[in-house]
Amino acid sequence: MNRFVSRDASLRVIQNIQQSSRPWLYDHEKHRLIILDQSQNERVYFRLPIDLPPPAKISFVEENQVNYIILLIQSGSCAMGYFENGINLHHKVFRAYMVRMKQGKSQIKHLKTKGKSRAGSRVRLGETVEFFENINERLQEYFALHHIDRIAMSCSKILIPFLFNAKIPTPFAKKDERIFKIPRHIHTPIYEVMMDTHKYLLKGEFIYEEHYQALVDELLGTAN
C-alpha cells in the first residue's frame, strides 16, 4: 500500500519515529526511513519529502534549508530546474532530433546495431552530442551559483554514459551520494511534467503491507 502525506505531517511522522522505541534506519540513497521490527526485519518504509534534509539534520523549530535540482532526461527531451525549499527558481527544457521517425527508435539504440553511415544518422548523432553538452552546461551554471544538497534524477541507463562522458563534464560524479533516483515513471520531460514530478516529491510517502496499517496510523498520530 501507498499513503501520501503533507510536508507538515511528514515532520510529525519523523519526530514520532525518532521518539518511539521502535528500531529504524535512514536510507540516504532513497531518502527514506525504514521501520524495523525487533529482529531487524524491514516492515514499513517512509520516503521523506525532497525539501526536508536527512533526519539527523532536520530542525523541528526552524526552517530547513534544502537546495536541489530536478533532472529528467529521455531521448531527445530534457527538463531540469533548480529549487530552494520547494520553490522553483530556474528551469530549462532541451529538445533534440534523436529519434528515427519511422521506427520510433532513438539514434543511440540504432547505432548499437546499424552503425552511423547515413546522413540522417550523422545528424541525429550530432544533435545527441550537443543535447548532452547543453544539459551539462546548464548544470554547471546551477552548481556554480548555488550550493546543491540533492539531485533528483530520472534518466534511462542507455543515456547515462552520454551524460557523464560529454565534452562538457557533468558537475557531479556518477556515484555522487546526492543523487536521488526518482521512484516514479516519468512521461516525456517538459516543464509541466517536471512540476508534476516536483509535486509528487514534495509529499511524504508510506509504503507498507496492509497488515501494518495500525503501525502507520500510530506513526501518523491517528491511532485510536
Image: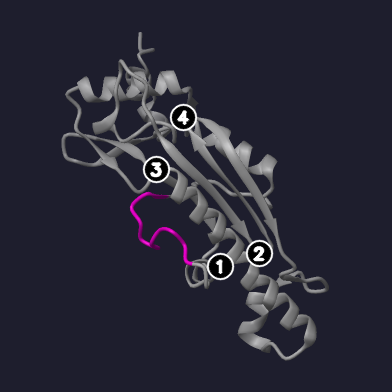
**Magenta region includes residue 204:** no
Type of amino acid at the residue the image marks with label 1? Leu
Q: How many marks?
A: 4
Q: Which one is closest to the eye, mark 4 or mark 3?
A: 3
Callout 3–callout 2 Cβ contact below 8 Å: no
Mark 2 vs mark 1: which is more N-terminal?
A: 2
Mark 4 vs mark 3: which is more N-terminal?
A: 4
Where 92 sits versus 137, above or below? above
Q: Which mark is residue 11?
A: none
Give x and y (percent) for residue 156: 55, 62
What's the residue at 33%, 18% (across, down)? 62
Is 211 on the left-hand or right-hand side of 37?
A: right
Nearer to the camera, 163 or 74: 163
Residue denoted by label 1 = 159
Residue denoted by label 4 = 85
Give x and y (percent) for residue 13: 34, 22
Give the residues in magenta.
169-179
Q: CA distance from mark 2 to mark 4?
A: 30 Å
Type of amino acid at the residue the image marks with label 4? Asn
Residue denoted by label 2 = 75
Mark 1 vs mark 3: which is more N-terminal?
A: 3
Q: Secondary structure at mark 2?
A: loop
Q: CA distance from mark 1 to mark 3?
A: 26 Å
Mark 1 vs mark 4: which is more N-terminal?
A: 4
What's the residue at 66%, 64% (across, down)? 75
Callout 2–callout 1 Cβ contact below 8 Å: yes
Q: Residues within 10 Å of mark 2 (few under 14, many from 20)?
A: many
| Main SS class of the magenta portion in the image | loop
Is 203 on the left-hand or right-hand side of 62?
A: right
Q: CA distance from mark 2 to mark 1?
A: 8 Å
Q: Which one is closest to the eye, mark 2 or mark 4?
A: 4
What's the residue at 52%, 68% (across, down)? 168
